[in-house]
Image: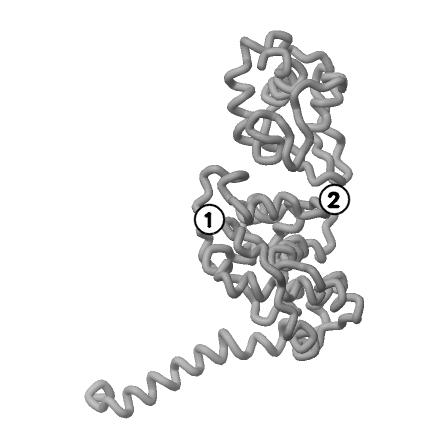
Amino acid sequence: MLEKNPVIFIILAFIVIMVGTAVTMIAPFKWINDPGDRIAEVKPYSPLQQEGRDIYMREGCNNCHSQTVRTLAVDVERYGYGGGYSKSGEFVYDRPQLWGSRRTGPDLARIGLKYIDPKGMWHRKHMDNPQSVVPASNMPAYAFLNTPLDTTYSERKMKLLKFPYTQADLDDLKGKSEMDAIIAYMRKLGTDIPVKKAAAAQHLPASRINPFSDLKAIKAEALSIYARDCASCHGDKREGTLGPALKGSARPDAELFAIIANGIEANGMPSFSGSLDEQKIWKLVTLIKLGKQDD
């Protein structure tokens, strides 16, 4: 009979929806994000980082990039970069949170852990021309962000959000561009959380002797590996861009192998031991050592 009385039906449907909303959306806030959920290492955004976050939202980056690493093992492996899955305490200073659900592009919750270059050079090149570092990317270019940063409301924002700041922080905004701001924001993402870096043994070859002495025999494959994994930072012709030129090297073969396998954290170079097997790394070593002779 109730379905024949639209007014009563609407009222009852509304009550059911509100009960469900209260149980799933409102009540949980009584026991989450309390002091026990806080992560002491997570700090508020600086004025420059907050400006970058606002630009990130203004440009709709959150329409294509999520910012939450789910507990699924595949998610943690792909987007965790050593930081694990997302915890509620990481987002205590986000107004609003940008978890999202659409991943036209990769998740960015831990992007600061992946590209650790203190100068943010990879991010700058990527924002200027995404295809220059990820050829298959469909992300548009954001070179237009190389414009002066509008700081009119910077201090007001910090006060409204109750984030700590100093006059030096505000002075640091002078001369900065919108590109500087969004890069500062990207470099912070994921870096505040405590990351336990396993003291894993360095990845070294089974034999310290390079099995490839003839570049011509493996050049095609070596160039293919280089184009996929190295060209974005070292240049298409190995002339050097973000990273040094790789046309010849006086380093011993085993040392080059170790650099490629283990990376150089201080310089922002990632480790390739997880994506390249020993044979492929040796082929890159051969290309770097002998490539100058064969150009």
**Residue at which label 1 appears:** 139
Is residue 88 at least partly visible in the picture? no
Q: Element at badge 2?
A: loop
Taking the spot 55% from the left edge, 9% from the top edge, the residue there is: 216
Q: Position of residue 204 (x, y in %)?
A: 72, 24
Disc nearest the viewer among 2 and 1:
1
Q: Quadrant of the image for the N terminus?
A: bottom left
In this orientation, which residue lies closer to the viewer: 149 or 119? 149
Q: Quadrant of residue 30?
A: bottom right
Query: Badge 2: few (under 14), some or many (20 or more) residues near its Cα, within 10 Å?
Result: few
Amino acid type at circle 1 is Met
Residue 16: horizontal and vertical position, in percent?
Answer: 38, 82
In the displayed structure image, the side of residue 37 where residue 142 appears, left or right: left
Residue sitting at 57 percent across and 67 percent down? 97
Which residue is the site of mark 2? 197
Q: Earlier in the sequence, mark 2 or mark 1?
A: 1
